[in-house]
Amino acid sequence: MIAGNIFKWIGSLFTDFLFAPFNWLRLTIAKSDGGWWTSNAVNWFFLLILLVLFAYWMKEAARFKKEGTEDRA
């Protein structure tokens, strides 16, 4: 009984609170002029974060390889 309530609470948390800004984007902003750009700005933001983190990861991997401390197991 408790487990069912926990999963209902988690579902309510995501649908009612965490995804509310995305519903607002979908229902109001996306239907206006420039809506495609505004809607996809979230995707471009996440892509930018991903590219920055990937570049950092590659820089650290090159540093470890140059120092000879890379784990090659």
Image (cartoon, helix red, strand yellow):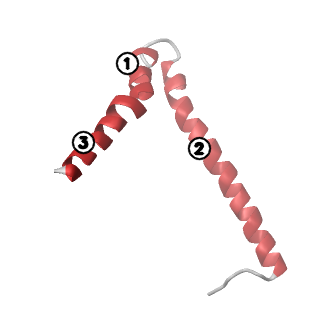
Q: What's the residue at 21%, 50% (across, down)?
A: 2
User: Whole-percent x and y of residue 17?
Assistant: 39, 30
- The amino acid type of the residue labelled 3 equals Lys
Q: Nearer the viewer, mark 3 or mark 1?
A: 3
- The amino acid type of the residue labelled 2 equals Leu
Q: Is residue 50 above or below residue 12?
A: below
Q: Nearer the viewer, mark 2 or mark 3?
A: 3
Sequence-wise, the earlier of marks 2 and 3 is 3
Image position of 35 (left or right of 71)? left
Image position of 56 (left or right of 33)? right
Q: CA distance from mark 3 to mark 1?
A: 25 Å
Secondary structure beneath disc 3? helix
Q: What's the residue at 83%, 79% (across, down)?
A: 67
In the image, farthest residue toward the bottom: 73
Q: CA distance from mark 2 to mark 3?
A: 31 Å
Q: What's the residue at 49%, 26% (across, down)?
A: 39
User: Whole-percent x and y of residue 40?
Assistant: 52, 31
Closest to the observer, 58 or 19: 19
Secondary structure beneath disc 2? helix
Q: Is residue 41 above or below residue 49?
A: above
In the image, farthest residue toward the top: 32
Closest to the observer, 43 or 15: 15
The residue singled out by tag 3 in the image is 8
The residue singled out by tag 1 in the image is 27
Q: What's the residue at 80%, 70% (across, down)?
A: 63
Sequence-wise, the earlier of marks 2 and 1 is 1
User: Whole-percent x and y of residue 72?
Assistant: 66, 85
The residue singled out by tag 2 in the image is 47
- The amino acid type of the residue labelled 1 equals Leu
Counting the numbered discs, the total is 3
Proximity of marks 2 and 1: CB atoms separated by less than 8 Å: no
